[in-house]
């Protein structure tokens, strides 16, 4: 077994998960894709290991997310996306036109980056910030920038 697959197998076992070809393929695919949605993951996993059902991909994504090996982000108006960067409190830039998603490091380097004026009894362990706008390609193509206040 090549070294990277052994590492993934050990990682799965360390989280109490059985080692399966779809789990290895999903983790490997997402690592190489950035922030794919479930359909893009299914296409890539099928390319890598052959036939795999859509339900198997969704089940695998949910299991890996529950185990803390994937992070699910849910940008409004776009399908849920997945990433393997789970060990820090980073944020995201999301293009309103094409949905391109990029990581943004935490502004202060401490989790959470922001501290609300009123906690309401909550013990806060994470701050999730999404910056919306247009990626360079969409801005260059003349897509209008829209906000909740309308087009600017």
Image: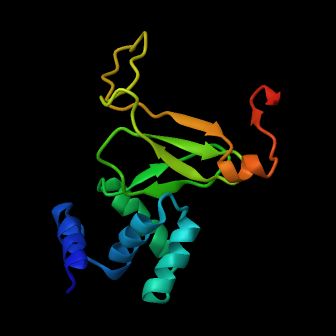
Q: Along the horizontal axis of the image, is 71 left or right of 99?
A: left
Q: Considering depth in this image, is 68 or 87 the residue closer to the camera?
A: 87
Does any portion of residue 91 appear in the rendered image?
yes
Q: Is residue 5 above or below residue 31?
A: below
Residue 43 location (% of width, % of height): 55, 77
| Residue in view at x 42 percent, y 87 percent | 49
Residue 83 location (% of width, % of height): 43, 56
| Residue in view at x 53 percent, y 62 percent | 36
Residue 91 location (% of width, % of height): 46, 39
Does any portion of residue 54 appear in the rendered image?
no
| Residue in view at x 60 percent, y 45 percent | 94
Q: Is residue 69 above or below residue 125?
A: below
Picture quarter containing residue 70? Answer: bottom left
Residue 108 location (% of width, % of height): 35, 26
List the single residue furthest toward the front.
Answer: 140
Q: How many marks?
A: 0
Q: Quadrant of the N terminus?
A: bottom left
| Residue in view at x 43 percent, y 68 percent | 32
Q: Considering depth in this image, is 62 or 86 the residue closer to the camera?
A: 86
Q: Is residue 65 above or below residue 46?
A: above
Q: Quadrant of the C terminus?
A: top right
Q: Is residue 89 above or below residue 28?
A: above
List the single residue furthest toward the top.
Answer: 117
Q: Considering depth in this image, is 51 or 133 the residue closer to the camera?
A: 133
Q: Considering depth in this image, is 13 or 33 the residue closer to the camera?
A: 33
């Amino acid at each position: 077994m090549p070294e990277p697959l052994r590492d993934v197998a050990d990682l799965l076992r360390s989280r109490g998960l059985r080692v399966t070809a779809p789990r290895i393929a999903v983790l490997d695919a997402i690592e190489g894709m950035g922030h794919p949605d479930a359909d893009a993951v299914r296409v890539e996993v099928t390319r890598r290991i052959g036939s795999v059902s859509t339900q198997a991909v969704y089940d695998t994504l949910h299991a890996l997310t529950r185990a803390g090996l994937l992070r699910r982000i849910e940008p409004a108006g776009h399908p849920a996306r997945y990433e393997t960067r789970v060990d820090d409190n980073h944020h995201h830039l999301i293009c309103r036109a094409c949905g391109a998603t990029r990581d943004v490091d935490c502004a202060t380097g401490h989790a959470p980056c922001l501290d609300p004026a009123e906690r309401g009894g909550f013990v806060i362990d994470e701050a999730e910030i999404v910056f919306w706008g247009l990626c360079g390609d969409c801005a260059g193509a003349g897509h209008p920038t829209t906000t909740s206040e309308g087009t600017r």
